[in-house]
Image (spheres, rainbow, N blue to C red):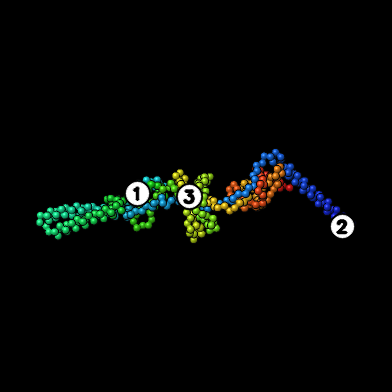
Amino acid sequence: MKASLILIIVTALLFVSCKHHSDDAVKNTNVISDSLIRTLQTACVVPEDEDNVIKLNGKIQPDESRLVKVYALVSGKLQSVNVELGDFVHKGQALAVLKSTEVAGSSNDLSLAESNVAMTKKSLETTKDLYEGKLATEQDYMNAKISYNNALAQLSKAKQVASIAGGRNATYMVTAPISGYVIEKNITNNSAVRSDNNADLFAVADLSKVWVMANVYEADMSHIHLGDSVIINTLAIPDKNYIGRVDKIYNVLDPATRTMQVRISMDNTSGELKPEMFATVKVSAKSAGKTLSIPSHAIVMDDSRNFVIQKNGAKLKVKAINLVKRLEDKAYITGLSVGDTVVTSFQVFLYQALTTK
């Protein structure tokens, strides 16, 4: 008798509880009007190749085949510097002027060699006339020939030294070997320059084409291949995408950073990409297989969990999902089925309405 009474009481309590939750569900559903449900934007769950996009940090650098470092071939003192960092220069344009004792010495050697040639030539002609008139010996004639040939050899050497060193009358011109921008300048007026110094005076680069050098961590190395397409963004113009391809993989690791470098050659006729700019490089590696995909903005995050609002006709419900990967405007997920419909507008409001008790 007592046991029957307890069973009746428990059943009554359960009935009341279920009715209470049913009333809450109706209440929450009634918050969302039919007119709002009809205007909701939705998207279907579709299977897609999972884009394996790898983000790399990179930097803009000059194309090394279009970069020339300028050195002084003689020692001297700078008389003037004619360009500044960032200036555009034409091939052959004077970058700086030096006063050099070496140039003065080579110029003097050239002048002496020219005078010696003229003198030995005159001597040879005189000796030849004497030899033909039987007034000089054959040995005298041969010695005159030898002296003249030696003078020609010294003149040739002096000309070669002068052409290599350049300059005239103690003045040496540092000229631009190519047309391009001055991207390095390591001298100032009145500086002393030594020919045995390893530091370059200037670096001139043609920036119509540049390299993007990106660092790849060990975990991503197996996913990077020659020819992979990339999208490059810079801080200067963050909304602009530069499209390129990986054209060189440097198969060595930097022991300090534990990274490997890859190179992307880029056209830069616009001049927007400048050396030393930081860049973000997104590499589209090979597909990792089919995965369910939805627009990333359809996801509502609550308490470190991910949810979507699933729509079936005029009915809405909150559905928990697992986020595999989010790539910009696309999210790869599990927890739904192909063909399911998710809401992509007012989803935060709907989530709150459907979950508020």
Disc 3 secondary structure class:
loop
Tell me if mark 1 has few (under 14), some (14-19) or many (20+) residues whose alpha carbon lies within 10 angstroms of its own.
some
User: What residue did someone put label 3 on?
Assistant: 277
Q: How far, Cα to Cα, is label 1 from label 3?
A: 28 Å
Q: Which residue is drawn at 67% across and 51% down?
A: 335
Q: In which quarter of the image is the N terminus?
A: bottom right
User: What residue did someone put label 2 on?
Assistant: 3
Amino acid type, label 1: Thr
Q: Residue at x 10, y 54 (%)?
A: 133
* Residue 193 shows in this picture: yes
Q: How far, Cα to Cα, is label 2 from label 1?
A: 109 Å
Check whether the beta carbons of the residues at disc 3 and disc 2 lie within 8 A of each other. Answer: no
User: What residue did someone put label 1 on?
Assistant: 175
Q: How far, Cα to Cα, is label 3 from label 2?
A: 82 Å
Q: Which residue lies furthest to the bottom in this view?
A: 255
Q: Earlier in the sequence, mark 2 or mark 1?
A: 2
Q: Earlier in the sequence, mark 3 or mark 2?
A: 2
Q: Earlier in the sequence, mark 1 or mark 3?
A: 1
